[in-house]
Image (spheres, rainbow, N blue to C red):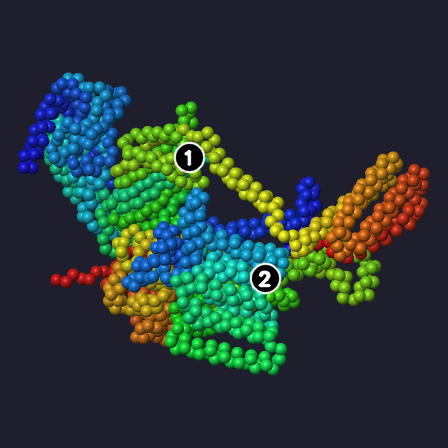
Amino acid sequence: MKIYRLVNAVLLLNSLLAESQIVNVNVRREIDLTSSLASHIFTIDVENRGPPLSSYLFALSSNQYERLAFIEAEQTKGAEDGVALEVLLPENISSVAAPENVSIVSLELPKPLDTGEKTKIELYVVFTRLMVPFPKKIDQADPQRVLYQDNHFFLTPYVTEQQITSVTLPSTLVESVSVEQPSSRTDYEITYGPYGEKPAFSESPMRLHFENNAPFARALTFTREIQVSHWGNVAIEETYLIQHDGAKHKGEFSRYDYQRNAKANGVSAFKKLLAVLPPRARSMYYRDEIGNISSSHVRHSDEKTEMDVLPRYPLFGGWKIDFMLGFSLPLPEVLSKTPEGRILNVSFGPSIQDLWADEVTVSVVLPEGSHSIESTVPFAVEESRGTKFSILDTVGRPVVVLKLRNLVPDHNKPFTVTYKSMPLGALRKPILLVMAFFCFFLACMGYLRLDLTLAKDEHWQAAEDKERARDAMHSLERAYSARGAILKGLDTALLKLTRTRAVEACLTARAGVEAQLKATREEVKQITDTLELLGHKDIAKLRELERKHHEKQVQALQVCALKIDYVKKCVDPKVMDQKLRGGEEKLAAVRQEMAELLAAIDFS
Amino acid sequence: MTGKSGVAISPLVLDSIGVKFSTKQLEILLRIAILSSTCLLAFSVRLFSVLRYESVIHEFDPYFNYRATLVLANKGYYEFWNWFDHESWYPLGRIVGGTVYPGLMWTAANLYWLLQLVTLTASLREVCVLTAPLFAALTAMLGYALGAEIRDRQTGLLAAALLAICPGYISRSVAGSFDNEGVAIFALLLTFYFFIKAVNSGSIAWSVAASLAYFYMASAWGGYVFVINLVPLYVVVMLLSGRFSERLYIAYSVFYIMGMLLAMQIRFIGFQHVQSGEHSMAMVTFALLQVYMLLAWIKARIADPAKFRLVMRLIVAAAGALGMAALGAAVLTGKISPWTGRFYALLDPTFAKEHIPIIASVSEHQPTTWSSFFFDLHMLMLLVPTGVHFCFKRLTDANVFLILYAMCSFYFAGVMVRLMLVTAPAMVLLSSIAISAMLTTYCQQLRAPAAPAAKLVKSGGKSGGSAGNHLEGQREVAAGMTVGIFILLSFFVRHSTWVTAEAYSSPSIVLAAKQSDGSRMLFDDFREAYYWLRHNTPEDAKVMSWWDYGYQISVMANRTILVDNNTWNNTHIATVGRALCSSEEDAYYIMRGLDVDYVLVVFGGLTGFASDDINKFLWMVRIGAGVFPDIREADYLNQGEYRIDKEAPASFLNSLAYKLSFYRFGQIMTEHGKPTGFDRVRNVEIGNKDFELDYMEEAFTSANWIVRVYKVKDLDNRW
């Protein structure tokens, strides 16, 4: 039954293909197995010997197709730059049937290939997990050996006239290599072919068993969140759940052996990953669920920022670890503004090199209020939209979510998101905060001006009186100090007089001081009256003090007047001093009495 | 201090810029400014740990609290209330909902929800890390309120400032120290504040507030027992010293009844509040108060003293007989439980050492040394007696409370290091009373205008020293003292900052060491090993370790553990201790019986990390011996001496803890000029170097060998 179906399918396909009659004139295949990923480069010279055709079919074994991570095709003509071809995966092709273990990929040519026309197609294909650890479990000291299985011949639905394959290995330590003559082998390279004409779907199993200690770093999940703030920052955070996907570690892990000689005891393990960040990356962090991971080093250069990411422990086969890696970029680095909107241009990730990932989610969080969002990614991804609430968000930030399975380093290409932002969108939060604080202060002001006393009883009255008395006492203090300043003005005027003998100026100054003093006297009187009304205990002393003040002022003014008079009359300074001495002494006595009075008054 | 001089200076400053304030407004403004900067200070001084290390949960217990908060925040109150944790104490499990003081988790989860509500999306970890500093700021505000209530506002302001930076309090409230004490000290002071308010005013409203605060306290920390004993003690002292008043009666009666009913709602307390011996003093005091009030009531109605004396004797005898009968019945029927070991250990410092090794083995339960008193309280130690003096000088109801609080807590702080925390606020309050009283006096003298010299001599001769205001050289002395106090305060600030930065900010899961070139080196071994367990062992793996690391393993490694820091089941811990001190083969049977998959030991011999399992070994033996008498401490000692070299007894050299710690260590050269296998903690060459493990295999060892994880091998295949 199965055979019947297979034959049937092949017949069907053949009948389809019979019409096309495309021939692979020459095929060159380069298989690179040096890392944990297998990459194939095909250079195919094609000739169409049938009717015009617009698509070229490319075959992969089902095993390979399941592990296909990245495919890119170009059509080149002579020295011209290649034209990228659209690649249709089997899910999207309806008309082609193939043998059961073969999947067909269709490359759409931009211009149909005419009868007899020749062209050259180049393909770049990357597979994950195509090298299988064998043995599956190893000790700490064992190197890791892998088994690679493929086809000696180029698998194709067309006739191939000539082909050659070269395989690059990561090491010279090779267990076994399958042979299909003619083939040759140097240290790191095996060449199969050239082979002559082979019919469609020719197969001859290739089996390579060799040592490969490249880090088999596989991210079971990888997410990258790019958060844009119009205040000048783009924050990028990547989370990884990484597993060593090579041969599983078995038995003891001896730290002693590992520290003594990591090369001999743990050659298959890796303890370091390299992250390459944009040159202007800043505020980097590297942490996990339980805190900061203190082992990392950063090197800056003009082209890039390199970060050595050391997981908490070295990873042996089958061991897992997760962590977060974050950094910020200045906004102008990745965002440009055009009349049509803003264009964000960032790389798809991951920052960590030489790693493949199963489940990938890249999300772009745009500022609140962004609209007309469109994303352009150079390869097929599953796109959806979401909303994220962050600090002080009211309606939430729009999020572009891009999902992908089987990511390899070749996917780390820039992609763009264009969007339009709200006018004054960036000011939204500051205004919100200002409003909130304004309301708070307004409420405080209202509260402080509000009198919630229900009944103004004697307690209330007493407290109120006390408060007013304190207030009055402080005003009094202030008035006294003001008065001191005024009197000092008199002194300076007199000093000037003795120097310049400008009698007129001094007279005006004296008049001014007199007026000012009168005004303060009024003020003090008012305050003292209030205090008397409130029944202040020191009121008598205050009155007394005020009398002394007055006495002092009169005396001072008198001394001043006398002095002016003497100056006018050009009395000898010595005589003048003698004559004035009586007044000065009186003044000093008043000052002394005042000081005593002041000390007895409670100003608090 | 600041308040007083500030008021005097500021009017002129503000006048000069044309702003006019009334005195009251000015005072409020200043007070708010001082208090808010105190808040800021209290909060930010506790962020040293985040700056010097990282924003991470500290130490041991906080990890459990964090885990419990996660459960509460993610699953809600009801699930939390009924939470049965089957991932700890395997195979017994733990009824967490009923054996936890949930106040801290409520607080943190509510803070988290509140922040979510106002769209400040902080992660729960951040909220937990910053809960303690936040409450420290609130506690500083309470310091102000208490100071103002007990003496005056100046004292309050000073108390707030001192409390904000007092090292004794900082030790348990730095960022990351997400422990019960962080909120409990706030609750404690809140209860005291409301109670003092209630006593001062005799108002039911304040005593209800006090009982609500007590409820919060009881929900947050086992230290609530201190409150429920101190308050009755205060009432009794007031009664005996003749300061009893109806205000006190109202305050205590309402507080006790409401507080008791509320505290009983906490599942962990429940009926203990009326049944256990630790709470009996409150109840007896309550009864006593009723009898006393009854007598007072009768006395007011019986004029004849002789008659009254008769009635009094009758009533006292009846009440006494009734009380004794009730007590006897309760004890006989087992309704009243005797005091617990922890309580005994508190009253008698030597009790734990003799009877409860599990309490004595914890470093924070050790008696306090004088140096740590100075370290934690600094100049407060000098000022407290002065403060007590000033309290006695102007004795009020509030003062009496403060003195009692200070005396009791000081005694307890002497018994256990960790209770330094409780005494710190009392010391701060007393010291601020001292400083405030002194400064008030001296500042008044400084502010008084200088009298001329001639007069001064005259008046001095006339009135002698009685005038006080006119002593010779008094201003100079006052100035000297003010400057002295200022210097003292600045030293305190310096000391506190230094202590906080150097001693109290280490998260203790990351160890820092100075390298020879002066740079800082971090040992992150704990997290390395825990994270390895988290990702590379089966999800249901059971990890056996000494109980110290239980909480950390359950959070950071997310694996089932046998014993943890809750130490509720002594037998289980003793079994683990027994496994660790038995030979590998005997231990294997115990471990198979307990379904153990991995064993984790902490080993410092390579790095010089002293608190490792080898240094804790004797406690394992002692705790094990407490339950299994066949374990004898002498078997692990060489003539009473604990050693790890060749002289050590064979039972120790072949014990599981020894083997797992030193497995393959004998091949390592740790220091130049020393033999291989030289232990850098004990400074000796180990005694058993060359051995293989038969029943275990090394599964993981961290980079500096501090944490070593072994896998328990399966049984051999039978054929």
Q: Assign the C terminus of chain B to one quadrant of the image.
A: bottom left
Give how far across and how far down residue A40 sits, in percent.
21, 33
The vertical placement of A397 against A311, above or below, is above
Q: Is residue A580 left or right of residue B83?
A: right
Please give the residue where the numbered disc 1 appears in the rendered image. A367
The reply to whether residue B374 is in sight is: no
Q: Residue A421 shows which numbered tag?
A: none
- Label 2 and label 1: CA atoms lie apart by 56 Å
- The residue lying at 88 percent from left, 51 percent from top is A586
Q: Is residue B621 left or right of residue A452?
A: left
Give how far across and how far down residue A270 sits, in percent.
29, 46
Give how far across and how far down residue A377 sits, in percent.
31, 30
> Within the image, what quadrant is residue B708 found in?
bottom left
The reply to whether residue A107 is in sight is: yes
Tell me which amino acid carries mark 1: Pro
- Of circles 2 and 1, which is in front? 2
> Within the image, what quadrant is residue B695 found in?
bottom left
Q: Chain of mark 2?
A: B
Q: Is residue A456 left or right of residue B559?
A: right
Q: Chain of mark 1?
A: A
The vertical placement of A352 against B500, above or below, is above
Please give the residue where the numbered disc 2 appears in the rendered image. B201
Viewer-proximal residue, A362 or A406? Answer: A362
Tell me which amino acid carries mark 2: Ser
Residues at marks 2 and 1, common chain?
Answer: no
